[in-house]
């Protein structure tokens, strides 16, 4: 939900009134300091304002004799959040739907749609969740980063509907995901810092060649016609040919650079999709791959059941060396993604315990994954092998990666990831575990620290 990234004891409420503005720290979940206030929660990490949860505060009536509560969009959103925190998801949905009918302002509309999507995600209703988020992105300036980082949408990120929404957002434009497209381009510029400089010179040289051609063409016509004072035909034709060739080359380089940028953005998008795919650790805890960043080097083994089994058996001979290097084996049997039924309230597994392994509502998700205590606990839960959740989404990502690398979809492949989550190397068939042991430095080595 909208409050998932701030711990209850640290939530910051912003009170606005006609007389003054003040800041205060709220107590767990709900806090009322005075009437006639509008409490907003600024998601500082995602740069988005969303209505914060607080109990449905009765609004003062216009008549001094009557002190009856007035139903507003704000109170409905707050009541919906309260109901969701108690597990009453169906009742929460009713409140969010009601809020959308009470002439909400843009911030209230964004909050109602976003939290409604969280409810649908909790119920396993991916299409409805996607529709709510799409509308919030298009009409109410929801930041796509909020969708990527909210743990209450973790189950939605394991569904095909999230992939569709992400692909729409990565295209950018005015309709949806402009900020997401902009963020992708910024990351691309960081990885290729001189692309903008190259483009500037392409345009400048192309413009110079175009201006020179503009003056050379009339001289070429006069040289062809001949007569007194006509310029030399060969020299003029040579100059025109050089200018035209330069224009063609610089335009081709500009197009090539644009194509490379699109390929790079596509790879960044695939890396982001990969980081959101869920795993179950040996302790039965469900995490997204991004939570293991800087902690392990995942090695994905994708292919037939026979290939995966053989690769795991050969890896077991180097178990101690691979564990010292932070290797976590992630077996993905291709073709079995559609056999697993999607369960509500989880990452798509049939286990009834999956929902309980998700981050609890209102839990401080970012601090839990980044704090020293949580990191050490997570490290103790990691073993040599993990189990994929939502195998259909893993298979979809692997096929996209194979297509980008020019590998036939469905072939037996392995993919070694870096500590920062990017692809380190990949190949066909069973990996050479001895070579991988030589290539990867131990986790306590300096090179591993630089890789983080």
Image (tube, rainbow, N blue to C red):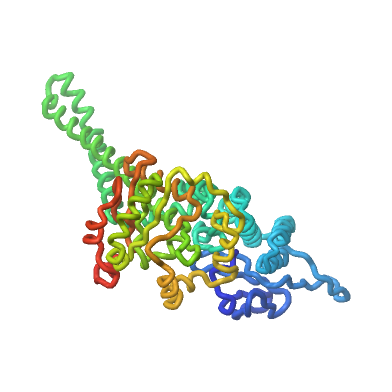
* Image position, residue 156 (x, y; %): 55, 55
* Image position, residue 272 (x, y; %): 42, 55
The image quarter in which residue 330 lies: bottom left
* Image position, residue 238 (x, y; %): 14, 30
Residue 373 or residue 438, whichever sits in front: 438
Position of residue 235 relative to residue 199, above or below, is: above
State left or right for residue 373 relative to residue 8. Answer: left
Who's the residue at 54% across and 57% down the image? Answer: 347
Residue 200 or residue 71, whichever sits in front: 71
Query: Residue most toward the right?
Result: 65
Position of residue 283 relative to residue 227, above or below, is: below
Residue 93 or residue 105, whichever sits in front: 93
State left or right for residue 452 relative to residue 215. Answer: right
Who's the residue at 32% across and 40% down the image? Answer: 406
- Quadrant where the N terminus sits is bottom right
Position of residue 17 relative to residue 326, above or below, is: below
Residue 54 visible from this viewpoint? yes
State left or right for residue 451 relative to residue 126. Answer: left
- Quadrant where the C terminus sits is bottom left
């Amino acid at each position: 939900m909208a409050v998932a990234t701030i711990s209850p004891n640290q939530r910051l409420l912003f009170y606005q009134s006609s007389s003054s503005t003040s800041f205060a720290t709220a107590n767990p979940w709900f806090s009322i300091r005075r009437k006639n206030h509008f409490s907003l929660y600024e998601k500082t990490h995602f740069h988005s304002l969303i209505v914060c949860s607080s109990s449905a505060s009765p609004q003062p009536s216009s008549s001094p004799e009557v002190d009856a509560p007035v139903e507003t969009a704000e109170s409905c959103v707050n009541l919906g959040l309260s109901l969701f925190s108690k597990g009453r998801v169906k009742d929460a949905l009713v409140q969010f739907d009601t809020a959308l009918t009470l002439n909400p302002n843009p911030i209230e509309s964004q909050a109602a749609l976003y939290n409604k999507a969280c409810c649908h995600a909790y119920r396993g209703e991916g299409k409805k969740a996607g529709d709510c988020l799409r509308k919030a992105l298009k009409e109410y300036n929801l930041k796509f980063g909020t969708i990527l980082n909210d743990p209450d949408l973790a189950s939605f990120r394991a569904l095909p509907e999230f992939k569709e929404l992400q692909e729409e957002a990565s295209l950018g434009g005015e309709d949806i995901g402009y900020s997401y497209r902009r963020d992708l381009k910024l990351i691309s510029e960081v990885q290729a810092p001189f692309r903008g400089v190259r483009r500037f010179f392409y345009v400048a040289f192309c413009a110079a060649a175009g201006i020179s051609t503009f003056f050379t063409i009339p001289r070429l016509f006069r040289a062809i016609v001949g007569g007194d004072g006509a310029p030399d035909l060969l020299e003029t034709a040579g100059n025109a040919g050089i200018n035209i060739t330069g224009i063609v080359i610089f335009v081709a380089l500009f197009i090539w650079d644009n194509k490379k940028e699109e390929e790079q953005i596509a790879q960044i998008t695939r890396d982001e999709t990969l980081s959101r795919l869920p795993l179950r650790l040996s302790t039965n805890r469900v995490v997204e791959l991004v939570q293991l960043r800087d902690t392990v080097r995942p090695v994905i083994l994708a292919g037939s059941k026979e290939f995966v089994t053989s690769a795991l058996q050969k890896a077991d001979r180097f178990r101690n060396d691979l564990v010292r290097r932070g290797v976590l084996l992630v077996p993905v049997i291709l073709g079995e993604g559609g056999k697993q039924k999607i369960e509500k309230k989880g990452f798509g597994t049939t286990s009834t315990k999956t929902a309980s392994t998700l981050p609890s509502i209102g839990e401080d998700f970012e601090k839990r994954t980044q704090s020293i205590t949580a990191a050490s606990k997570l490290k103790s839960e990691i073993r040599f092998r993990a189990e994929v959740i939502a195998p259909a989404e893993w298979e979809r990502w692997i096929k996209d990666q194979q297509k980008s690398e020019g590998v036939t979809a469905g072939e037996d492949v392995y993919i070694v990831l870096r500590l920062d989550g990017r692809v380190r190397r990949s190949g066909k068939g069973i990996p050479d575990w001895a070579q991988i042991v030589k290539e990867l430095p131990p986790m306590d080595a300096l090179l591993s620290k630089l890789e983080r």
